[in-house]
């Protein structure tokens, strides 16, 4: 009698375990929605997203290995459950930028919580034709799409993927909160135009770590209203370094606070770390604070080597209206005052 009861109990446990596993494993493979390698993926992605976003429990969208052509994608939330975007293929943009508005994303994720973008895949912006056109920021360039736009994304992880040859910025993060960027590759040629690696604005508690950024403009650029940003183990170069700003250009800008840059390597960059209120010159450290006060700046254990770099003449660090606190071994040249300030 006792023995039989035990058997019943263990049988029940097995059934429960199986049903939990099924619920947690909802997969939406784009090839089941009509996507074919070397074909156009737009509609399949939109259809897979619609179903994944409405799923009652954690949903995984899969883009398997293969190259797929994509004109534009817009992934809008909120979704019912956490969504994983498992990106193992290559998404390829058309070479011409047509039909994009100011600062629009080629791929946009918007209003999502608990989003994971992961995989070994590549977002290829196919920007080669765009960069040749020297332009003023106010006309042609701003109609070039940003490779990946993250608007109002919270509690999310972006990991593993590559973004390549974006027409404009690789990533733009607007009003993000509690985000982790890790193990990313961000690549465009040195001569590419306005291809900032990660641009952040009005975002809080963002970590960028274990990431390689080789691009034509700032590796990371930090816009107004950014707080609690940790940048660590990032390799930057080629590129223009890590920049705060430009700030002070518009009214109603929010302050930038609590930015930490640790264990980063800059190789062949035109600048290291800079805070700019306007376009600076070529310096390893450029802290020019005028219209905007800079406080609590600490420099700790900076090992600077210049070997046949693009820095013309001796390396310079320029500091205006800022007194950085030095600790540990800092072998920067001492701050001089910017004459042009
Ligand atoms: C900051 O974001 C991380 C995710 O990157 C999260 O684990 C952590 O809890 C967040 N911190 C706060 C104070 O919300």
Image (spheres, grey):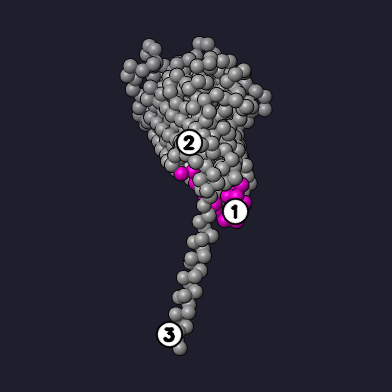
| Marked residue nearer the N-terminal end (1 or 2) | 2
Of the numbered discs in the image, which one, if any, rests on residue 55? 1
In magenta, the rendered stretch is 50-64
Residue 73 is inside the magenta segment: no
| Marked residue nearer the N-terminal end (1 or 3) | 3
Mark-to-mark CA distance, 1 and 2: 28 Å
Mark-to-mark CA distance, 3 and 2: 60 Å
Which residue reaches farthest right? 252
Q: Residue 259: x percent and y percent?
A: 51, 33
Figure check: 285 above or below 260? above
The image quarter in which residue 271 lies: top left
Q: Residue 102: x percent and y percent?
A: 63, 26
Badge 1 element: loop
Q: Nearer the viewer, residue 100 or 112?
A: 100
Of the numbered discs in the image, which one, if any, rests on residue 3? 3
Crowding around mark 2 (Cα neighbors within 10 Å: few <14, some 14 to 19, many 20+) is few
Q: Residue 195: x percent and y percent?
A: 50, 25
Name the side, left or right, on which 42 lies relative to 315.
right
Would residue 323 be visible to someone looking at this image?
A: no
Of the numbered discs in the image, which one, if any, rests on residue 146? none
Query: Looking at the rendering, in which quadrant would you find the N terminus?
Result: bottom left
| Marked residue nearer the N-terminal end (3 or 2) | 3
Of the numbered discs in the image, which one, if any, rests on residue 38? 2
Crowding around mark 1 (Cα neighbors within 10 Å: few <14, some 14 to 19, many 20+) is some
Which residue reaches farthest left? 307
Would residue 42 be visible to someone looking at this image?
A: yes
């Amino acid at each position: 009698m006792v023995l039989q009861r035990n058997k019943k109990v263990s049988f029940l446990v097995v059934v429960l375990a199986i049903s939990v596993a099924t619920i947690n494993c909802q997969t939406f493979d784009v090839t089941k929605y009509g996507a074919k390698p070397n074909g156009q993926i737009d509609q399949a992605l939109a259809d897979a997203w619609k179903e994944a976003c409405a799923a009652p429990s954690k949903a995984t969208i899969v883009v398997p290995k293969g190259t797929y052509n994509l004109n534009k994608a817009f992934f809008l939330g909120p979704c019912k459950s956490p969504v994983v975007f498992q990106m193992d293929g290559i998404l390829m943009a058309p070479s011409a930028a047509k039909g994009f508005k100011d600062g629009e994303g080629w791929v946009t994720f918007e209003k999502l919580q608990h989003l994971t973008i992961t995989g070994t895949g590549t977002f290829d912006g196919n920007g080669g034709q765009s960069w040749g056109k020297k332009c003023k920021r106010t006309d042609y360039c701003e109609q070039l799409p940003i490779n990946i736009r993250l608007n109002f994304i919270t509690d999310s992880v972006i990991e593993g993927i590559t973004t390549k040859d974006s027409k404009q910025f690789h990533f733009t993060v607007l009003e993000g909160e509690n985000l982790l960027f890790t193990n990313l590759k961000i690549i465009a040629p040195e001569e590419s135009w306005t291809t900032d690696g990660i641009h952040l604005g009005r975002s809080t508690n963002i970590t960028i770590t274990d990431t390689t950024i080789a691009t034509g403009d700032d590796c990371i650029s930090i816009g107004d209203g950014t707080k609690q940003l940790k940048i660590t183990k990032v390799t930057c170069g080629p590129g223009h370094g890590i920049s705060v700003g430009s700030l002070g250009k518009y009214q109603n800008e929010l302050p930038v606070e609590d930015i930490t840059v640790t264990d980063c390597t800059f190789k062949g960059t035109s600048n290291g770390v800079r805070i700019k209120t306007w376009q600076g010159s070529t310096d390893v450290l450029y802290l020019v604070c005028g219209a905007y006060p800079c406080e609590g700046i600490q420099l700790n254990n900076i090992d600077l080597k210049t070997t046949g770099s693009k820095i013309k003449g001796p390396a310079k660090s320029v500091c205006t209206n800022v007194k950085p606190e030095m600790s540990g071994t800092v072998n920067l040249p001492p701050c001089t005052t910017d004459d042009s300030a």
